[in-house]
Amino acid sequence: DGFPVDHSDGERRPSVVRRPVVRQRFKTRPPPVPRPQADGRRGRWKAPAAPTWVDSHQESPDGPEHKRWGSVEAEWSTDAGSGAEDEHDVAHDADRRECLEQLKAARLEQERRNRQLKEEAAARQRQAEEELEHRRREQELAAARLKRQAEQLRRERMLAEHERLQKRAADMMDSSPSMGSPRPTVAPPCRGSTQDDPLLKREAELLRQQQAEWERRRAEQQAFERKLQQELEEKRRGMEQQKEQESYEEARRRQRERDAAEQRERRRQAQREAEKQAAEEKERRRQREREEWEEWRKAEHARQQKEDQFERQRQDDLRRRQQQVEEELRRRMRDQWNRFHNQTHSGPNPGPHPGPHPGPSFGARGPGSARGPRGFPKPPPSGSQSARLNPPAAMTAEQRQVWNELQKLQSVAAPEKKKAVKDLLFKWHPDKNPNNQEVATSVFQFIQQQKKQLGVD
């Protein structure tokens, strides 16, 4: 059981067990199994794609064809997709299906035309062969008919000549003195006498003429057959050349189709690479724009906070100075009232104020009373009488800039304030800003509203 017994002390110790070496099956992780996308479209599968974080120059040890992708992160990045990417894939698939349908229709139309052309060529070839066979049969029939006529004519001539010779021989025997009895004492005619016979000469001449006529007709028939055989051989060679030319054209057409298919595949591959690079460049540009926007937003937020802090500090300083001025003015008015009261109620005949309406004391009226003593103006109420601008709830960057400029005009004289407001209205008039009329109109209306609060007519 792997635990040998040591007989010295009886303790069981585990022996060294060699584990089998597990060979690595894949150098890189195989691609993930495609799973259905959770986009609501039933039955649609999307093939796994390489993750975006894999660089295009990163390669595996197996070669440039095997990329280092297919990890768990790649599966997660493949499964997670946005609606825009799905719409882009759907549009791309629709365009691809439409192109494939057009190519399939064009291929079917080309195959139909090729079959039609082949059928027409085969029909023309069959018609030519039938016409040639018909002509050959007609020529054979005509030759056989001429041969039969010549044979019949020859037999008729031979029969006529034989009958004529028999009749002549019978006439010669009838006209002889012996009445046809044999003449043993008379020797047969010699060769010379036979050649001198005009009838035999004429018969030999007729036979020679018939032989010559037969030889001539036979030569004509052989010449006609040779010519017909030559025409058939030329037709056969022409048909073979036509078949070879058609096969050569078919091979060239198939080669052109293969070259065109390879070229289209290369163009599609280049287009896919270009689209992939464009998508990566677009993603990098978006990331860069997001980073720039985030930096600008942070900088703008910091600047806005600084401006708000500076504005609050300036408002606090202005409010503090106004309070100091009001306190100083209130103190001076109080001193004036005290001096006036002392001057009024002090003298050689102190007493009540003469008149039907005696004036009350300073304590009765005070700075907040509706009316001061006779002959002295009403004291100012608590608070500043200068125009004070109330900031709106929400302002744009241009309105805030104009607001800061209007804040600086509070301590300026009325003519200069009126001139500055007029310059601002002229600057932000919509007719002077044709490129951005909406912003100019809103700022122009904002200046008119603030002008009423400043008290500028």
Image: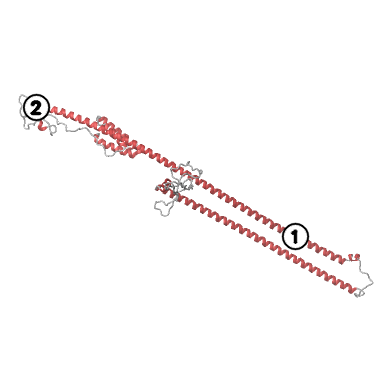
Q: How is the image coloured?
A: secondary structure
Residue 428 seen in render: no
Judged left or right of residue 14, residue 308 is: left
Q: Which residue is mark 1?
A: 222
User: Which secondary structure lies at badge 2?
Assistant: helix
Q: Position of residue 148 (x, y in %)?
A: 75, 66
In-front residue for pair 140/103:
103
Instruction: Identify the residue at image location x=71%, y=57%.
Output: 230
User: Which secondary structure lies at badge 1?
Assistant: helix
In-front residue for pair 179/70:
70
Are there few (<14), some (14-19), or many (20+) residues within 10 Å of tag 1?
few
Instruction: Identify the residue at image location x=26%, y=35%.
Output: 451
Judged left or right of residue 211, residue 426 is: left
Using the image, determine if residue 43 lies above or below residue 172. above
Using the image, determine if residue 310 lies above or below residue 238. above
Using the image, determine if residue 227 lies above or below residue 203. above
| On-image quarter of the C terminus | top left
Q: Position of residue 212 (x, y in %)?
A: 80, 62
Instruction: Identify the residue at image location x=72%, y=64%.
Output: 142
Q: Position of residue 164 (x, y in %)?
A: 84, 70
Residue 238 seen in render: yes
Amino acid type indicated by mark 1: Gln
- Report if the CB atoms under discs 2 and 1 are less than 8 Å apart: no
Q: Earlier in the sequence, mark 2 or mark 1?
A: 1
Q: Which mark is residue 344?
A: 2
CA–CA distance in space, label 2 to label 1? 173 Å
Judged left or right of residue 354, residue 217 is: right
Using the image, determine if residue 342 lies above or below residue 245. above
Amino acid type indicated by mark 2: Thr
